[in-house]
Image: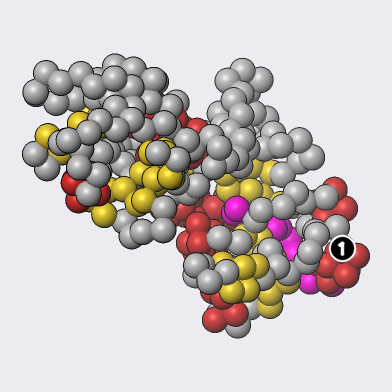
Amino acid sequence: MRLVFAGTPATAVPSLDALLASRHEVAAVVTRPDAPAGRGLHVAASPVALRAEAGGVEVLKPRRPSDPDFLGRLRQIAPDCCPVTAYGALIPQQALDIPRHGWVNLHFSLLPAWRGAAPVQHALLHGDDITGATTFRLVAALDAGPVYGVVTEQVRPADTAGELLERLAVSGAELLVATMDGIESGELAARPQPADGISLAPKITPGDARVRWDQPATAVSRLVRACTPAPGAWTALRGARIKLWPFAGIGDDSGLRPGPGQLRLQGRQVLVGTGTQPVRLGDVQPHGKRRMPAADWARGLRLDESAAVLG
């Protein structure tokens, strides 16, 4: 089939690579406009745009998918189908109507669970054991279109959102190509999503990523893993923000039970109290400083001489 692929972040690059290596023709790529990125916030093209340009594929960067110039160019290209992975903008009905097989989205959950912008993060936040990826036809309602296929993925105990999403991006890319194959052959038909089991996965904001130390240790650990690498879990000490990476463990053998948010240094381990068991901090990054092991950071606080409470 003749395809126009839509995607923006690095997560979408495996999908584009898989489609470029398939029997289908990727006639063009749609991606978000160039935007500030990196520490210097220099304006840069998206990862998908860079990959498409390297492959000699036409790149379209509409400010909005409803822009008349973009819609006109899409009609000229006349794609049979528009596969999508993490494009980052809502597709209007006038664009959905152009390809005869519609727009087919790769979503990183087992729909109808976790409809929305942050399905992997919410799967970790809620302690799901199994997640996956789904291909479905885009409709006006959020992630509610009929489903073509799914792949499942075991959630590992130490997974961060970044690690889990990296695996899903690869297995999902294979699913997306298989879906294009099935649509082209006529062997694959979309099935309506179940009416039961719907859950929503809104974007995780920096405010959501602040640790509440009065929560159970397992919930605190899930939050940190779900917010790694973005937006980054954090806490504060004496008014200064501290970014947190996944914990080195939960519980200890010393019998110490620091109160919620209370820090205790034990050898090379930094314990923090929660609503249940203490957790052992992994790496931390104080505001304006580099990432470092928690023990190195804590020794500079002279915790052996004074108590400190995170909040």
Which stretch appears magenta?
76-86
The residue that appears at 76% across and 35% down in the rendered structure is 141
Check disc 1 and report its element: helix, strand or loop.
loop
- In the figure, residue 153 lies in which quadrant? top left
Q: Position of residue 156 (x, y in %)?
A: 30, 37
Residue 95 shows up from this direction: yes
- Against 54, residue 248 (above or below) is above
Using the image as rendered, state which of residue 72 and residue 294 is in the foreground: 294
The quarter holding residue 260 reads: top left
**Place of residue 144 in the rendered image (x, y in percent of width and height, measured from the top left):** 69, 34
Q: Nearer the viewer, residue 44 or 22?
A: 44
Q: Is residue 23 visible?
A: no
Q: Residue at x 20, y 37 (%)?
A: 303
Q: Tell me the quarter of the image containing the N terminus.
A: bottom right
Q: Is residue 166 left or right of residue 94?
A: left
Q: Which is nearer the eye, 163 or 12?
A: 163
Q: Is residue 169 left or right of residue 253?
A: right
- Tell me, yes or no, whether the highlighted magenta stretch contains residue 83: yes
Q: Amino acid at mark 1?
A: Asp
Looking at the image, residue 124 sits to the left or right of residue 50; the answer is left
Instruction: Check residue 141 for magenta coloring.
Output: no
Across and down, in percent, residue 9 comes to: 55, 60
Report the residue marked by disc 1. Answer: 67
Q: Residue furthest right?
A: 68
Name the residue at 56% across, 28% down.
Answer: 113
